[in-house]
Image: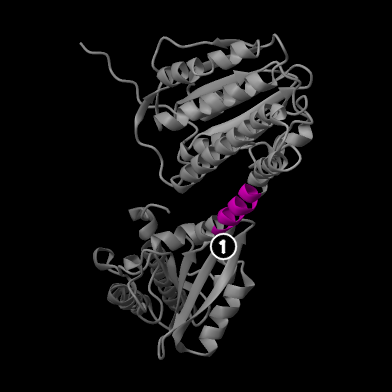
């Protein structure tokens, strides 16, 4: 939500009122003097009388100007604590600034006459004075509820749901107490609750689907060993090997699901620890050296001399390195190579270019957008993992990072895995307020890049 309004924006209504009163003063004086000049020209009054009349007119209008100040100019030191706009025809129903939720008031002419800082951000008032509700509110449902409250006062608030976007839902509580001349609207953001409910539903559906395959295999071999193969112990060894593979796959799947659930539950709270990307890179890459040798892949990791500190979570960042590097090893051609590079950039735009825009003839897709909390002028640390696999067809790029989505058809056939690796990386980068992108060239390779906020460099001692 936005910061409090600046002093200049708060005083805009005061300056506007003063300018209107000054205009009235000038028009009134000019009218009196014009009448006196006309009477002087026609001989109706003499010069002395005209001068005296002009002085009297100036005195009367000056008295009006000064006397009306107490009525029309609000005291800026004691202005209402309930609104950021000039008060309307009646006092506020409640002190809006005391409410933790976005709240605003609408008068009987359907003009927004008061709001708190949270509502200013939601409504995008942008300094407008007493705007009509229909100019800022695009929801017919909410406008109808306001209109109904104007026509039928009630102490019981009416609750309506407002769809503010494809993935954003608000609940508006609209009330007008009896005898009140304003309608109070309090907004409640339902988006996190809806996302959580949708995530739970997707989690149950996906988990049950993916767990069913290894469980079916285990059950089938158990039945076979109990039935047709009961008297064939020689085949039991082969069956047990397959069952062990399926059990291991199920164990990895459960571990990835638990990891993903844990990351999602803490995604709204940004990490605060200071972590060295150099240490993360060394730990993550060393854990996969044996896997690379086993598959005949050359793993090249450009470990920097400097620490490259970032604000992040050490264990989660190791997961990022391990998931991206293991994906590169799985999909690289035999005797191919996987290259890992890392560096520091002056801002997020430059970091994205270094991480995922190195090939001139590649197809690209940004998978995680850099959020507003990471300003475009803030330094970032970027990481790039390149493989020499078959590449990815462009139609698959938008779906990369979806749970259980695999691109085996475009990347060389059946590849073992849970289908959650990139989803975990995406959520970790969202948790770190960073970004993620991919670029690919068919029959040449794919590169995944991530970037996240850099920590301030420590000053050298001395």
Task: Residue at 61% x, 69% y: name it.
Answer: 139
Q: Image point 38% across, 62% down: which residue? A: 15
- Residue 44, by quadrant, is bottom left
Q: Residues within 10 Å of mark 1 (few under 14, many from 20)?
A: some
Q: Position of residue 97 (x, y in %)?
A: 34, 65
Identify the image quadrant of residue 444.
Answer: top right
Q: Residue at x 49, y 77 (%)?
A: 174
Q: State the extent of the magenta-drawn residues as a range.
A: 197-208
Question: Would you say residue 362 is visible in this rendering?
Answer: yes
Question: Which residue, given by chain and number where applicable, does mark 1 sit on?
Answer: 169
Indicate the position of residue 416 as horizontal and vertical percent values.
Answer: 67, 29
Residue 249 vertical position relative to residue 211 in the rendered view, above or below: above
Give whichever of 43, 54 is nearer the camera: 54
Which secondary structure lies at badge 1? strand
**Render colour scheme:** one colour
Q: Horizontal placement of 239 versus 67: left or right? A: right
Q: Is residue 198 above or below residue 221?
A: below
Q: Seen in the image, is 132 located left or right of residue 63?
A: right
Please tell me whether the stretch drawn in magenta is mainly helix, strand or loop.
helix
Depth check, front residue: 458 or 244: 244
Residue drawn at 60 percent across, 36 percent down = 247
Eyeballing the image, is 359 above or below 179? above
């Amino acid at each position: 939500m936005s910061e409090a309004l600046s002093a200049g924006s708060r005083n805009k209504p005061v300056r506007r009122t003063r300018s209107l009163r000054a205009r009235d003063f000038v028009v009134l004086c000019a009218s009196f003097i014009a009448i006196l000049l006309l009477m002087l020209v026609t001989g109706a009054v003499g010069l002395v009388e005209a001068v005296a009349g002009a002085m009297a007119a100036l005195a009367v209008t000056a008295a009006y100007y000064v006397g009306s100040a107490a009525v029309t100019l609000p005291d800026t030191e004691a202005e209402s604590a309930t609104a950021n706009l000039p008060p309307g025809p009646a006092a506020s129903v409640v002190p809006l600034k005391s409410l933790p939720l976005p709240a605003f008031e609408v008068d009987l002419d359907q003009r927004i006459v008061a709001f708190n800082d949270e509502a200013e951000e939601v409504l995008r008032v942008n300094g407008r004075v007493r705007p009509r509700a229909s100019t800022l509110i695009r929801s017919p449902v909410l406008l109808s509820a306001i209109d109904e409250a104007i026509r039928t006062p009630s102490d019981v608030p009416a609750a309506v749901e407002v769809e503010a976007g494809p993935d954003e839902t608000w609940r508006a509580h609209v009330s007008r107490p009896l005898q009140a001349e304003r309608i109070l609207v309090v907004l409640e953001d339902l988006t996190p609750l809806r996302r959580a409910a949708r995530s739970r539903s997707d989690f149950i559906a996906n988990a049950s689907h993916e767990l069913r395959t290894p469980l079916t295999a285990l059950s089938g071999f158990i039945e076979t060993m109990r039935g047709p193969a009961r008297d064939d112990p020689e085949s039991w060894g082969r069956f047990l090997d397959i069952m062990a593979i399926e059990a291991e796959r199920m164990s990895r799947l459960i571990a990835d699901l638990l990891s993903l659930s844990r990351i999602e539950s803490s995604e709204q709270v940004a990490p605060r620890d200071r972590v060295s990307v150099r240490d993360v890179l060394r730990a993550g890459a060393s854990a996969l050296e044996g896997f690379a040798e086993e598959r005949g892949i050359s793993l090249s990791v450009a470990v920097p001399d400097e620490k490259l500190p970032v604000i992040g979570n050490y264990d989660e960042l190791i997961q990022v390195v391990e998931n991206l590097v293991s994906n590169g090893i799985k999909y690289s051609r035999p005797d191919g190579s996987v290259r890992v590079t890392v560096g520091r950039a002056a801002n997020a735009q430059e970091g994205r270019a270094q991480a995922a825009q190195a090939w001139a003839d590649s197809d690209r897709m940004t998978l995680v957008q850099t959020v507003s909390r990471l300003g475009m002028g803030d330094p970032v640390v970027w990481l790039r993992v390149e493989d020499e696999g078959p590449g990815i067809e462009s139609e698959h790029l938008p779906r990369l990072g979806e749970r259980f989505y695999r691109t085996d058809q475009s990347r060389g056939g059946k590849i073992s895995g849970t289908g959650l690796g990139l989803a975990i990386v995406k959520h970790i980068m969202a948790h770190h307020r960073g970004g993620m992108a991919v670029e690919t060239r068919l029959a040449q390779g794919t590169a995944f890049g991530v970037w996240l906020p850099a920590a301030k460099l420590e000053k050298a001692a001395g």
